[in-house]
Image (cartoon, rainbow, N blue to C red):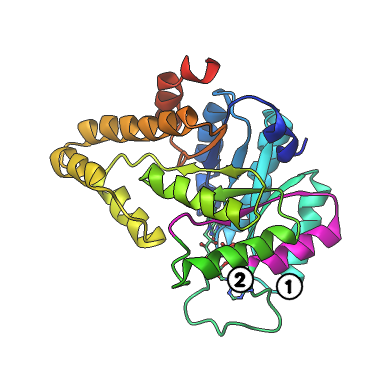
Amino acid sequence: MKIIDRLKEDKIHISFEVFPPKTDEGYDKVVRAVDEISRLDPAFISVTYGAGGGTSRNTAKIASHIKDDLGVLSLAHLTCASSTKEEVRTVIGNLEKLGIENILALRGDIPEGMKFPDADRFRYAYELVEEIKKHGDFCIGAACYPEGHVENEHKADDIRYLKQKVDCGVDFLTTQMFFDNDIHYNFLYRIREAGISVPVLPGIMPITSAAQMKKSQQLSGTVFPRRFLAILDRFGSSPAAMRQAGIAYATDQIIDLLANGVKNIHIYSMNKPDIAAAIMENLSEIIKA
Ligand SMILES: Cc1cc2nc3c(=O)[nH]c(=O)nc-3n(C[C@H](O)[C@H](O)[C@H](O)COP(=O)(O)OP(=O)(O)OC[C@H]3O[C@@H](n4cnc5c(N)ncnc54)[C@H](O)[C@@H]3O)c2cc1C
């Protein structure tokens, strides 16, 4: 089944993201986490794609396990900056052989020291979207950035390029993590005005430790509101308190989104089924209402 068909249903959908192991030794541990997350009745589970090496190989393997063994829709991420066009085509062919119908098409971060652009590689995600469309009947998702992508100084350009990407055949968008819902509402308003009408899944990252917050900030350049910084300041040194506060903050963000008419939420569950389960428990009646 295609994710876009599920998103069209008139109900609330909560999905989760997991990442594959860095080494083959870590595979079983990740599969155990995925199995637990699948019991939370997610709309789908997405599997990230690393910049080369074992993690990329394991993306397809875990996405197949989710679909075939757990009976849950899976979304395989695919990046193009770190691979040649031929390598990307091979991965798409493999996904097709495995019966994976849903791909999140991404450029990926440009590996350090790499000469880019390079004629042998896709330069932007929209080129990858075009390539995937040539291969078969996939449902294609793509990334978007409510605070703007870090490489692009001008938000208006970012939205113009997003429109170009969507027009190449993107069925839905998932956002970069954000911690202030007003930024998301503003972004939605601007992209709808720009003529982007596909479903947008807000990406919610439960931050449950000070170290995780630092890493998220480095990766995404996201703005942490004062309300969040106060939580970190007061509870950051107590792991148990920070975990509880992080779960509460993410829950609060989701409740606000649902109360404002958002129907689809993507949770960056970071292979932590206990945190995913705690959020779902907090939402148990809310998602039925
Ligand atoms: C939901 C989500 C999931 C992700 N999953 C992964 C993952 O699994 N693995 C991973 O390695 N990374 C992942 N990323 C990170 C992502 O790969 C990086 O943010 C990357 O830098 C940009 O990827 P993109 O697909 O958004 O690129 P693009 O859409 O190609 O955009 C990249 C930059 O180029 C600009 N641009 C686009 N088109 C043009 C154009 N025609 N001319 C000039 N400029 C243009 C954009 O404005 C932007 O600044 C994810 C991000 C998100 C939000």
Nearer to us in this view, 204 or 213: 204
Viewport quadrant of the N terminus: top right
Residue on which the image places disc 2: 81
Residue on which the image places disc 1: 85
Nearer to us in this view, 91 or 254: 254
Q: Is residue 92 left or right of residue 135?
A: left
The answer to whether residue 100 is above or below residue 92 is above
Q: For disc 1, does the CB lie below 8 Å from ligand 1?
A: no
Please name the amino acid that badge 1 sits on.
Lys
Q: Magenta stretch? A: 125-147
Please name the amino acid that badge 2 sits on.
Ala
The residue furthest front is: 193
Q: Is residue 34 left or right of residue 146?
A: right
Nearer to us in this view, 147 or 116: 147
Nearer to us in this view, 61 or 262: 262
Residue 201 drawn at (x, y percent): 56, 42
Q: CA distance from mark 2 to mark 1?
A: 9 Å
The answer to whether any part of residue 75 appears in the image is yes
Q: For disc 2, does the CB lie below 8 Å from ligand 1?
A: yes
